[in-house]
Image: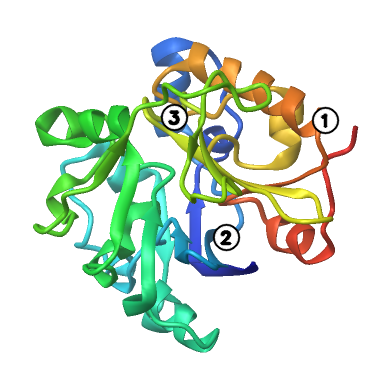
Amino acid sequence: MRIHSFSTGRVRVRPDQVRGRGGGVIRRLNVLRDTGWTPPLPIHAWAVEHPEGLIVVDTGEVHEASGARYYPAAHPYYRRSLRVDVHESDEIDRQLQRAGLSAEQVRWVVLTHLHTDHAGGLRHFRNAEIVLSADEWAAGRGLGGWARGYLPHLWPRWLTPRTIRFTGDPVGDFPAGHPLTEAGDVVLVPTPGHTHGHLSVIVRRDRQPDLLLAGDASYTQQLMLDGVVDGVSIDERAAHDTLLRLQRHTRSSPTVYLPAHDPDSARRFRRGQTVPS
């Protein structure tokens, strides 16, 4: 296998989103009240050249999102708490081209979740099989999805994903897993909390540490190790349980932990730097 790390642009959010403050509704309100901004954070996506087919994990955002009118003005979060900087050259199709690959080659696109900075680039993958959790697909659609922070009106009309229910055997500290590949070396595991159906992807490699592509299960490795729930998680209890599982899993098995917005993810990936035991 050959794995590629892409940063599909940058995003700035409120500090209280990255490190949640307070509990329940107050935690989410604090994000809207916060007047500060984080430094620009990467929007990571990943490509796995696998003998069974090319896999993309998350699709990043599109360049139109940098415009003031792309996101709905009536949505308080998008109006107040998000700033995106994506150029056309940052989009996932261009990133694949620079790596000698193409969007048309992709067999599977795995979405950790359906938030727009992870699903915005779906339009480039009409020929791929889109894979996400059944809980995520149910949570994201319609007016209910809009109220939960999704933007289903921006999804491609052709989107008919393969949805996964986690009913298989346990995978390490996760209650179940779903092998994406027949070889069993790319495995999806449930990591709910940030969204109801959030998942992560474990890539097992010969004689090298596992990679854990964690989406937004935490915003940084350190916040995962500290057990800090972010400010926008839809289910605080599930998010905390996920962080505990991630702590146990990454400490018990050599793992390079790679959240989507951690400024250090690309460096850890290049160096093969595992989570401290």
Mark 3 residue type: Val
Tell which tag, 3 or 2, sits nearer the viewer: 3
Label 3 neighbour load within 10 Å: few <14, some 14-19, many 20+: many
Q: Name the residue under label 2.
A: 40
Q: Which residue is drawn at 44% across and 11% down?
A: 24
Q: Is residue 85 left or right of residue 176?
A: left
The residue most toward the right is 277
Q: Which mark is residue 232?
A: 3
Q: Is residue 190 above or below residue 121?
A: above
| Distance in Å between CA atoms under marks 1 and 3 | 26 Å
Q: Is residue 130 left or right of residue 186?
A: left
Q: Name the residue under label 1.
A: 251
Mark 1: secondary structure: helix
Sequence-wise first label, 2 or 1: 2
Tell which tag, 2 or 1, sits nearer the viewer: 1
Mark 2: secondary structure: loop
Q: Residue at x 45, y 86 (%)?
A: 97
State whether residue 115 appears in this view: no
| Distance in Å between CA atoms under marks 2 and 1 | 29 Å
